[in-house]
Amino acid sequence: MSVPLGKMQQNDYARFREFLEKACGILLGENKQYLVTSRLSRILKEYGIKDLGELVSIIEKPGQSDLRDKVIEAMTTNETSWFRDNHPYKSLQDRVFPELAKAKKNPIRIWSAACSSGQEPYSISMVYQDFQIKNPGLLTANLQIIATDISPSVIKDASRGRYDGLAMARGIPPEMKERYFTRVGDEWEVDAKIKSRVQFRQLNLLQSYALLGKFDVIFCRNVLIYFSTELKRDILSRMAQALNRGGYLFLGGSESLTGISDRFEMIRHNGGVIYRLKD
Ligand SMILES: C[S@@+](CC[C@H](N)C(=O)[O-])C[C@H]1O[C@@H](n2cnc3c(N)ncnc32)[C@H](O)[C@@H]1O
């Protein structure tokens, strides 16, 4: 008889770890069997798959992209919030937008590189709108925000731009909620102007960024923590190439470039750290 997911064979677990790292970069620890069990049991039941070994055999074959996407989605963490950690958004207001205004940059291009359900790119768009209100005429540039994520379902939700009460309780200041959202039944919808600056696309960070063009700012927050040092190096060197001269990189609160990239200057600002591409 086959071994159920609960009594996972080491060999199957090793094959699954290898699949996951190759497919999306996520590096599972040696002893995360419980995580795999809890996150995949629903999919195994839905597809009538008996154990992890059979699942890996199926998703390794070509033409299984739906199931493969579901497995990757189940294994990724989509945790996010509005204006997460505050300081990156304050730094956009106090430093990055004034600099770009002075340089008469137009259009301004920002990449939200693992945007989850959209709170990050929409927060950037709201900060931009606020900056224009507070500094009339200073920044007239067109802002383009390209928001990408590996998960097709979070991209679909994010493009819809509607959030339930739980999502709205996470980080949105009341005056921003009042200014930039409209209530639709039980949900709140991001205003059209805020939405219009954001283009959502599915993109795996392991793939090429060549088609995205160049950016003035990249937000790559709370995703590199799941990857190996080698992969972080590769992603950050390709992100450096995707930035315009003097462009900024924002990482998550627990992420740093130490020992990973020397292409950036570290700047302490507003109680956080931001990175600027060296000349
Ligand atoms: C914890 S969320 C971070 C969201 C947002 N950046 C923030 O800081 O609030 C991590 C996101 O990374 C995405 N992700 C994981 N692996 C990825 C990959 N290889 N390429 C693109 N996105 C990936 C997940 O789907 C998830 O939405």
Image (spheres, grey):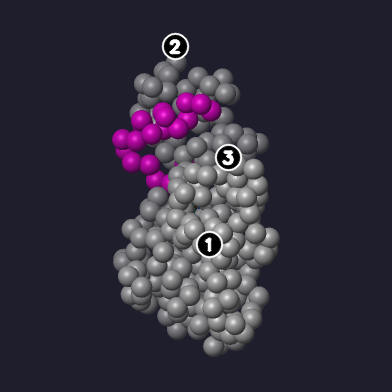
- Between 216 and 171, the one nearer to me in the picture: 171
Dividing the picture into quarters, in which one does residue 132 lie? bottom right
Place of residue 161 in the rendered image (x, y in percent of width and height, measured from the top left)? 62, 52
- Between 230 and 107, the one nearer to me in the picture: 107
Asked if ligand 1 lies within 8 A of label 2, the reply is no
Disc with the residue nearer the chain's start (1 vs 2): 2
Asked if ligand 1 lies within 8 A of label 3, the reply is no
Amino acid type, residue under disc 1 in the picture: Met
Is residue 153 at all visible to an observer of this figure? Answer: no
C-alpha gap between disc 1 and disc 2: 57 Å
Is residue 34 at all visible to an observer of this figure? Answer: yes
Amino acid type, residue under disc 2 in the picture: Met
Residue 69: mark in rendering = 3
Residue 1: mark in rendering = 2
Residue 176: mark in rendering = 1
Q: Which element carries disc 3, helix, strand or loop?
A: helix
- What secondary structure is the stretch in magenta mostly built from? helix
In the rendered image, the quadrant that contains the N terminus is top left
Place of residue 258 in the rendered image (x, y in percent of width and height, measured from the top left)? 31, 66
Place of residue 140 in the rendered image (x, y in percent of width and height, measured from the top left)? 64, 81
Q: In the picture provided, is 247 more to the left or to the right than 145?
A: left
Disc with the residue nearer the chain's start (2 vs 3): 2
C-alpha gap between disc 2 and disc 3: 28 Å
Residues drawn in magenta: 19-43
How crowded is the residue under tag 3: few (<14 C-alpha within 10 Å), some, or many (20+)? some
